Image (cartoon, helix red, strand yellow):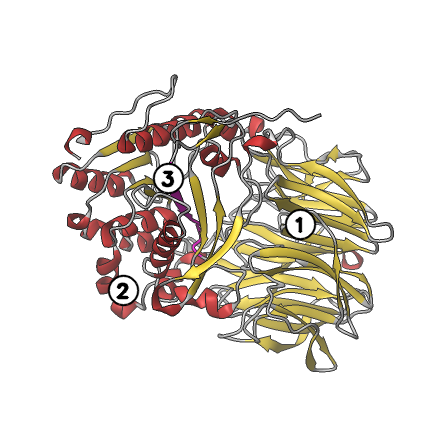
Amino acid sequence: MTVATSKQPAPCGAWTSSITAAVVAAGATPLSQLAVDGGSVYWLEGRASEAGRSTLMGGQGTARAELTPLPFNVRSRVHEYGGGAYAVAGGQVFFSHHGDNRLYRVGADGQPVAVTAEGERRYADFVIDAPRQRLVGIREDHSSGAQYPDNTVCAIGFDGSETVLVDGNDFYAAPRLSPDGAHLAWLCWDHPRMPWEGTELWLADVAADGSLVNGRLIAGGAQESICQPEWSPDGVLHFVSDRSGWWNLYRYEHGVVHPLCPREAEFGGPQWTFGGSLYGFSSPDEIVCTYIEAGVSRLARLALRGGELAPIATPYQEIRELRVEGSLVALLGGAPTIALELACIDLSTNQCTVLARSIERLPEGVYLSVPQAVSYPSAGGRTSHAFHYPPCNAHYAPLAGELPPLIVIGHGGPTGMAASTLKLAIQFWTSRGFAVLDVNYGGSTGFGRAYRDLLKGQWGVVDVEDCVAGARHLAEQGLVDPQRLLIRGSSAGGLTVLSALAFHDVFKAGACYYGVSDLKGLDADSHKFESHYNQYLIAPPERADTVYRERSPIHHTDKLRHPMIFFQGLDDKVVPPQQSESMVEALRARRLPVAYLTLEGEGHGFRKAESVICTLEAELYFYLSVFGVPIPAGLQPVAIENLGDA
């Protein structure tokens, strides 16, 4: 028997919810970097209670064990973003320790033993070459004292010896040995390209002494992005390329490249980190793969010779990683009501077992907003994409005739993608009566090369236009209040916020977390991997100064006309406090409502639970105050200057 309950009318934004700021601050356990070996599944698990270190876990079925005890932190710093921080094969486990950047081997007694010497070298994306008693991976050498480190493909002996196998390019990734150990494939690229712009796939023979001979370029170039080269069990090289305009699967055999399954779908993703995997071999004749269509991940079996793609049913709409060994498939999956989790699928029975969850106790379903994928017209005749989250709370409804306020969010990167996996930070808002639009603006991945390249030379323009168009679209559909449109973002997303408020008159308020207001400052602080990224995003060097000034909100503060709240870590070295302070002073001078919260001991990105709680609650208080919504009891007040003058 079901008892009907009526919802209480209350102003949107003032609804109470069990998804508190403290619940958001408690966050999720990070899960990443899967591997399978001998029927065992391995993964990295974040430990917030242990200074945020990543530890290596392994298990079969529902059993699990920790392989790297305190103080070991399994993390690589190659390219700064890392990834590919461990390797396992035949029960042997090697990993990179963030504390000293050395490689370690897990000994027979379970205790890690150092392999490489102390120094200024970092390692990532390594594979185990057991017959030669060595690892083959990427080495980043900082010992020269030069502005940028030297990157190579390197052999690291189990005895600690190191031999450079390939050098001369700015960047390398994905060295992969053939099953018989006779061949090595790898990726490389050079400035000013990023790996999603253009990479090269090389192949060489491995000589008797372990050196490489007969190296040859077999695919790729300045306008073709290749990722994830892998060998089939019978020794045929496969890879993902966007040569068709979409990251699709290919086979290299007898000197010829063959497409496996031409499709307007993405079987690969941007190589921000090492070691990503979106396909694997269940047999010499079959691949298990995940691909993205219309922003949603799907899982399938692909027959290698016939090209037939047979779907595998899962509850997931986002699949971040995928590893395959025979009938065992391990993946990280999430959906609108499923926080990211590690699942294992037995292909012989289709049984799915969850091995680890990022959030063990989810909020009640009555508070969870399920997003709808929307596409809408934007500037220049293009179509943009987003996920629309309507307000959701089983106990409250808007006042009669009231439309909800809308918060627009642009993802970071900016070469990245918003997915629909459950995020507590979004549900915090929707369960209080706000609608949210999570935008995959032009430049996002998951929609093909042409869509990704929309941001070329247009960062700060296309992303902003698509956020503006998305807000207008929902307002025109009668889904949100056109007089209560909000935009929030952090770091690069903060640039989108500031640009939207400076160059457009659509949003009525904004929240900027340690946001970029001066583009020129990014070049001065960039590391090697991203040091030329702005040439793609904004302008080549000869035009940079002019375009930077045109697009940097810090030079257009006279155009600001709506309330803003700023959050800034005082120890931020990436976007220093001066960038926020200049914007705050400009709003003060124009007598616009402004609030500014600084946080001691926080850098670029807030990590302390008390910081997350403080900033979320302050942002909520700010929005309610600006729109004249009653403030719920217990919400701490925030000093908002000039609010009475608005």
Q: Is residue 153 visible?
A: no
The residue nearer to you, when weighing 72 against 25, is 25
Q: Residues within 10 Å of mark 1 (few under 14, many from 20)?
A: some
The image quadrant that residue 152 belongs to is bottom right
Q: Does the CB distance between marks 3 and 2 fall below 8 Å? A: no
Indicate left or right for 354 with 610 as reference. Answer: right
Residue 160 is labelled as 1
User: Pointer 3: what residue?
Assistant: 405
Please say whether residue 473 is one of the residues in the magenta stretch. Answer: no
**28 lies above or below 376:** above
The amino acid type, in three-letter code, at marker 3 is Pro
Question: What distance separates the C-alpha of mark 3 from that of mark 2?
Answer: 37 Å
Q: Which element carries disc 3, helix, strand or loop? A: loop
Quadrant (top left/top right/bottom left/bottom right) for the N terminus? top right
The amino acid type, in three-letter code, at marker 1 is Gly
Quadrant (top left/top right/bottom left/bottom right) for the C terminus? top left
Q: Nearer the viewer, mark 3 or mark 2?
A: 3
Counting from the top left corner in percent of width and height, residue 232 is at: 77, 66
**289 lies above or below 245:** above
Q: Which element carries disc 1, helix, strand or loop? A: loop
The amino acid type, in three-letter code, at marker 2 is Ala
Counting from the top left corner in percent of width and height, residue 8 is at: 47, 25
Q: Is residue 581 visible?
A: yes
**614 lies above or below 203:** above
